[in-house]
Amino acid sequence: MDKILLVNACVRGSASRTLRLARELAACLHGEVTEIDLAAEGVTYLTSETLRQRDELVARGDYSAPMFRFARALLECDQLVVAAPYWDLSCPAVLKCWIEQVCVNGLTFRYSESGVPVGLCKAKKLWYVMTSGGTVREETNMGYANLAALCKGMFGIRETQCISAEGLDIIGNDPEAILRRAVDALPNG
């Protein structure tokens, strides 16, 4: 049974349409789901002090500290589901903070002798789930583009897919019908 890591970057909590769609996807994947609610966890950006602490631990090869819990969860999952609403051509800042937390040299990636990142994660796929009030053009979906590039170029997660439900707030659209169509189009495991 696959270990599915659901990273919840939906700061609106249970009212989030993105989270609803992501949980439906995770259920379709038929695995053991672990959800990390980034807002509830209080995920924040790295500071000079946390970077100093992290550098000391990495230098010793000690990845047991609580500060590495998100990186360890990423390292151990078979499939990664990220729930991140489309905000300002990107994603909520809390997801960007999580990315800082999981980019750990020697844990989720290492550098080759020529300085190229080599992914250490075993996940087969990133599923990036988003909803949007309007429509999204591929070239403006920077949240997905950034995370897909990190997964492929740094973590070793080669396959990525964006699942979206768009136009939810356009006057005259039926947001529930749009969400139902997105759910109906989800994979069956």
Image (cartoon, helix red, strand yellow):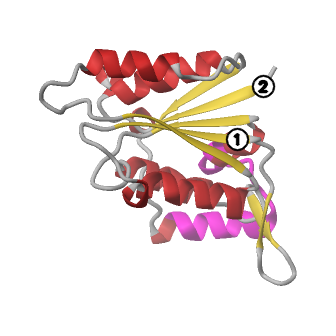
Q: The magenta stretch spans which residues?
A: 50-70
Q: Position of residue 81 (x, y in %)?
A: 58, 35
Mark drawn on residue 2: 2
* Residue located 39% across and 37% down the image: 39
* Sequence-wise first label, 2 or 1: 2
Depth check: give the residue in front, 58 or 30.
Answer: 30
Q: Position of residue 171 (x, y in %)?
A: 12, 29
Name the amino acid type tagged 2. Asp
How would you rate the neighbour count of disc 2 (Cα within 10 Å): few for under 14, some for 14-19, many for 20 or more? few
Q: Which residue is mark 1?
A: 125
Quadrant in which the N terminus is drawn: top right
Give the secondary structure at mark 2.
loop
Residue 63 colored in magenta in the image: yes
* Residue located 53% across and 22% down the image: 185
* Residue located 73% across and 55% down the image: 108
The number of discs equals 2
How would you rate the neighbour count of disc 1 (Cα within 10 Å): few for under 14, some for 14-19, many for 20 or more? many
Quadrant in which the C terminus is drawn: top right
Extreme-bottom residue of the structure: 114
Give the secondary structure at mark 1.
strand
Residue 22 colored in magenta in the image: no
Q: Quadrant of residue 177?
A: top left
Name the amino acid type tagged 1. Lys
Prevailing secondary structure class for the magenta stretch in the rendered image: helix
* Residue located 70% across and 35% down the image: 79
Q: Position of residue 188 (x, y in %)?
A: 67, 17
Q: Is residue 132 left or right of residue 120?
A: left
Q: Quadrant of residue 69?
A: top right
Extreme-front residue of the structure: 172
Residue 181 position (above or below residue 56): above
Marks 2/1: CA–CA distance = 11 Å
Depth check: give the residue in front, 153 or 41.
Answer: 153
